[in-house]
Image (cartoon, rainbow, N blue to C red):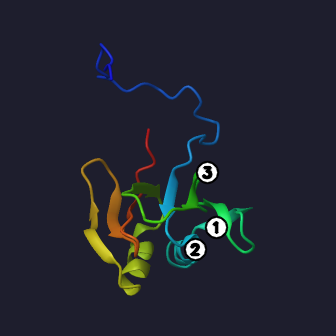
Amino acid sequence: MTLPATAVTAAVTPSSPDRPPTIWPSVPYPDPQAAIDFLVATFGFEPTALIPGDEPGRYAEIELRWPHGSGGIIIRSWDRPAPNWLYVVTPDPDGLYERVKAAGLEITREIEDTDYGSRTFTVVDPWSVSWTFGTYPGS
């Protein structure tokens, strides 16, 4: 592999700030139906597309949208979870923090205010995927 000759040293203004995101993280789970049930009930994702798989009642992919923004994730089947860490912008991190705490999930970063202006926390779901929720929307 050849690395680029010039290192990235400055941020730029996005060239398409008014368009919806076109990058969809794909998160593998060994039991996609259990994962979607959990992510919808506990975090509040909305299932917007169920793409059928080879077997009846099974899905090749499941699209989940975040109700507080334009992004989403794709849940797919895999025999074991892959290490993932996702950041999700939420207008109510304190309310979501209380929900995940009540669900008994492992919180790896307690809710806090950061020096860059976000209120944030990190939790691990039952399949070892890390989720950080915060108010920082990016620039």
Residue at mark 1 to residue at mark 2: CA–CA distance: 6 Å
Image height check: is 111 above or below 87? below
Determine whether, in the image, residue 32 is placed left or right of residue 106: right
Q: Position of residue 77 (x, y in %)?
A: 56, 63
In terms of secondary structure, where does tag 2 sit?
helix
Q: Mark 1 and 2 residues: CB-CB less than 8 Å, in contact?
A: yes
Q: Position of residue 44 (x, y in %)?
A: 56, 72
Image height check: is 34 above or below 87? below
Seen from the viewer's position, the closer of residues 72 and 135 is 72
In terms of secondary structure, where does tag 3 sit?
loop
Q: Looking at the image, which residue is at 34% across and 54% down?
A: 118
Q: Mark 3 and 2 residues: CB-CB less than 8 Å, in contact?
A: no
Seen from the viewer's position, the closer of residues 120 and 53 is 53
Q: Sequence order check: which comes first, mark 3 or mark 2?
A: 2
Q: Which residue is mark 2?
A: 40
Seen from the viewer's position, the closer of residues 103 and 79 is 79
Residue at mark 3 to residue at mark 2: CA–CA distance: 16 Å
Image height check: is 52 above or below 5? below
Q: Mark 3 and 1 residues: CB-CB less than 8 Å, in contact?
A: no
Q: Sort mark 2 into few (<14), some (14-19) or many (20+) by Cα contacts within 10 Å.
A: some
Image height check: is 121 above or below 99? above
Residue 46 is tagged as: 1
- Say which amino acid is labelled 2: Val
Q: Sort mark 1 into few (<14), some (14-19) or many (20+) by Cα contacts within 10 Å.
A: some
Which quarter of the rendered picture does the C terminus lie within? top left
Of badges 3 and 2, the one in the foreground is: 2
Residue at mark 3 to residue at mark 1: CA–CA distance: 12 Å
Which quarter of the rendered picture does the N terminus lie within? top left
Determine whether, in the image, residue 79 is placed left or right of residue 76: left
Q: Which residue is mark 3?
A: 70
Seen from the viewer's position, the closer of residues 90 and 74 is 74
